[in-house]
Amino acid sequence: GESVGLHLPTLSVQEGDNSIINCAYSNSASDYFIWYKQESGKGPQFIIDIRSNMDKRQGQRVTVLLNKTVKHLSLQIAATQPGDSAVYFCAENIGIEGAQKLVFGQGTRLTINP
Amino acid sequence: KAGVTQTPRYLIKTRGQQVTLSCSPISGHRSVSWYQQTPGQGLQFLFEYFSETQRNKGNFPGRFSGRQFSNSRSEMNVSTLELGDSALYLCASSLGYAVGDTQYFGPGTRLTVL
């Protein structure tokens, strides 16, 4: 399998519980933030995104919260399932005028215990 | 709709050689970005191409180069390989017109330099 960061922060939760993954970003001018999920041997998979003019956005079983004051993002996953086990990355797009340039956080390894 | 494809999936090279990686974006996407993923440095932006032009560049030496063709397919080249170039190389495609255009990743090419 893939080794995505040997010293990642880890989070272990029981199946069915809710999980919260946190991320700090650096660029106060960033306008667009994304959460990706990466499973072993795969590329990052888009989960949910949020623009800077919002502080909360909900998807299916996931919610992203944005606190621009302290430059903090969080991803909440409700009723976790074994398939949620993966490494989760936050990213900010610091590109200008359509240019794409993602800056990624270090990632958090989420483990779901049966 | 087919996702982002990358070839080859695995490569083994020796120091001093050069390598070319290929990425085919999602149909209709005009932006292709390349990222390097290592356990020590995480996910780092290499460069982005849009309509055959490099629009953004990360902090990598000139040994790393790329290009994009008129059909939006992209190639990345690394010359004079070093041991530290061993990594998972990911490409991502997006529409490329706005910062909020989602980037979708391919499965990556695993490069090992011996």
Image: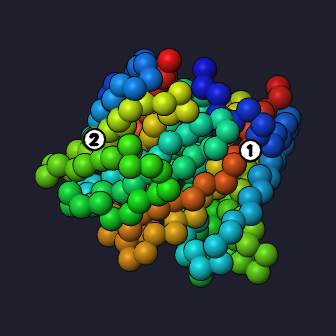
Q: Residue at x 23, y 50 (%)?
A: B68
Chain holding disc 2: B
From the viewer's perspective, is residue B95 above or below residue A88?
A: below
Q: Please, what is the three-letter code of the amino acid marked with disc 1?
A: Thr
Q: Which mark is residue B114?
A: none
Question: Dot 1 corresponds to which residue?
Answer: A108
Q: Where is residue B86 drawn, in percent x and y? A: 52, 29
Q: Position of residue A84 (x, y in %)?
A: 68, 37
Mark 1: give few (<14), some (14-19) or many (20+) Cα within 10 Å: many
Can you give x and y, in whole percent of width and height, for residue B19 in the image? 33, 29
Say few, some or many: other residues with alpha carbon within 10 Å of mark 2 (under 14 / 14 to 19 / 20 or more): many
Where is residue A86? Give x, y as percent.
67, 35
Query: Residue beneath label 2, please?
Result: B75
Secondary structure beneath dot 1 equals strand
Going by the image, does A84 lie left or right of A30?
right
Screen quadrant of the N terminus of chain B:
top left
Nearer the observer, disc 1 or disc 2?
2
Q: Is residue B83 visible?
A: yes
Amino acid type, mark 2: Glu
* Left or right for B100, reference A114: left
> Which SS class for mark 2?
strand
Check the image and tell me how it is coloured: rainbow
Q: Please name the residue shown 57% across and 46% down the image.
A: B43
